[in-house]
Image (cartoon, rainbow, N blue to C red):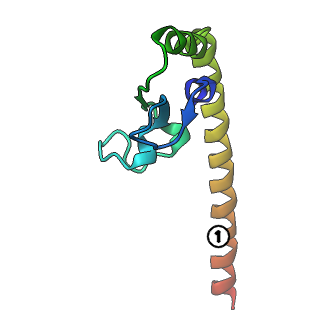
Amino acid sequence: MLFYDRLKLSKGPMIGTTFTVAFPCAAVGDISENVVGAKIEDTKFVRINIGLEPLSELKRVFDEALSGDTDLVAQEGVQKKKRNNRNKNKNRRINKKMEREQGQWFID
């Protein structure tokens, strides 16, 4: 989540603070069907709890995080593709290992 990574805010599920906090919805166990079982890096939702900072400071922080957002979308797409490829390769290795192990059972 590049947007989340680029936010220069405190991060984590700290509700009730006087400063602004950002965290992925999945981090607090939301039960929406869109985030159930989602990994934090896969979720598209970020919850923001606004604190007492001046509005101009918050606007600057969000502008910086959103700047070049076409770049952001492209980078997120590349990262997701890499993750998918890693998962496919891992699944292939697991499947091959299982096939070998099953073959050994039948040989014995």
Residue 95 lies in what quarter of the image? bottom right
Foreground: 16 or 77? 16
Count neighbours of disc 1 (C-alpha within 10 A) and say few if under 14, some if 14 to 19, many if 20 or more: few
In this rendering, the answer to whether 104 lies above or below 93 is below
Q: Residue at x 63, y 85 (%)?
A: 106
Q: Which residue is mark 1?
A: 99
State left or right for residue 23 relative to residue 79. Answer: left
Q: Residue furthest left?
A: 32
Residue 16 lies in what quarter of the image? top left
Q: Residue at x 67, y 35 (%)?
A: 82
Foreground: 90 or 98? 90
**Picture coordinates of residue 99, whole percent (x, y):** 64, 70
**Picture coordinates of residue 10, whole percent (x, y):** 56, 33
SS of the residue under disc 1: helix
In this rendering, the answer to whether 27 lies above or below 75 is below
Q: Residue at x 61, y 17 (%)?
A: 72
